[in-house]
Image (cartoon, helix red, strand yellow):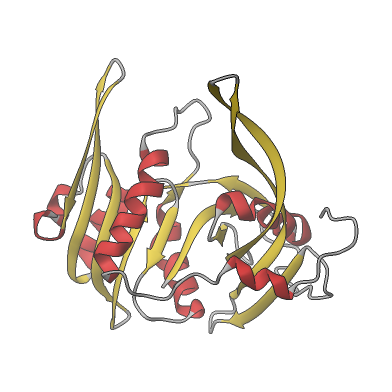
Amino acid sequence: MHAASLFLTLNEARDPTIESKMDGELPAVDAEGVQYLDGRELYFGTAADYVEEQIQKVHIDHGKISTSREDVINRKMVEFYADVATDPGFIGVSSVSDGEWLVKRIAAKTGVEVTETRVDVDEFAARIREEAEAPNAWNVSRQEDYGGGMEETSIDYHRSADLEAAQSGTIGLGFEYFWDDTRVEGIVYESGYVALYTDTIAEVFGAWVREEVLPHLYIPDVDDEETDQATLTEDEQDRAEVAATDGGGEDQQSLDDLDTVNDPDGGGA
């Protein structure tokens, strides 16, 4: 399985190369590169750094229970995919909260502008419905806006999922179809999260993102309110992945592997 939350990159990179940095200190980057026949370059691998996050603390004092939030710094690891040689391009990380530092680092080093992005799922569904061979949907998530703050979210799985229904307000689509004579199965969310559950290599996932997803990315209006997809992604994404893989598939590398990276004296990135 390969999965990533996507960021759109603008402007042609002055140098699309992403180099490894494995000197025993954080940040650390272990990058591999591949060049496609058309000259495009994809870099992928893993990266780790110190990431600041908030944890909830529970206090019991004088018979009362209260909570507070505390800032902590932990070592985090992400998987990444980056194809920034052309305008537009993309950077994908397996966790936005853990990998935002890497997105900014890649943008600064390659000279591209990076922005949050969304997937037009209706458009993606229409294209595979009309052009792909043997398309099928196993998850169709839709959101209906009735105005006045009234919204309704519906999710259909497997036999109840109808690809024809993915034509208006679709925020998540679990799909199957043939791409380059290969049967691909995965999911795309409006939030920018995409995944392929098909047993494939990183180079194929990167090519699929560029050819199949990149044309349907768009920059959301700054005035747009965040949809319920933000909460749907974390919960329903997990449920969808279990439904698709039946609990199988490759597990993401454990954060315990960060023990192989030496903790520099004094901490901090």
Q: Residue 231 location in percent, x, y?
A: 39, 40
Quarter of the image holding residue 185? bottom left
Q: Residue 65 location in percent, x, y?
A: 53, 24
* Above or below: residue 127 compared with residue 37: above
Between 191 and 64, the one lying in front of the other is 64
Residue appearing at x 26%, y 39% in the figure = 169
Q: Residue furthest left?
A: 159
Residue appearing at x 56%, y 60% in the figure = 93
Looking at the image, can residue 239 be seen? yes
Looking at the image, can residue 17 be seen? no
Residue appearing at x 24%, y 42% in the figure = 142
Between 98 and 165, the one lying in front of the other is 98
* Above or below: residue 29 compared with residue 12: below
Q: Quadrant of the C terminus?
A: bottom right
Q: Residue furthest front?
A: 62
* Above or below: residue 16 compared with residue 166: below
Quarter of the image holding residue 251? bottom left
For residue 254, side relative to residue 191 (left or right): right
Q: Residue 103 location in percent, x, y?
A: 66, 55
Q: Residue furthest top?
A: 148
Quarter of the image holding residue 194? bottom left
Q: Quadrant of the N terminus?
A: bottom left
Residue appearing at x 19%, y 61% in the figure = 138
Q: Residue 143 location in percent, x, y?
A: 26, 36
For residue 94, side relative to residue 262 (left or right): left
Between 50 and 4, the one lying in front of the other is 50
For residue 240, side relative to residue 52 (left or right): left
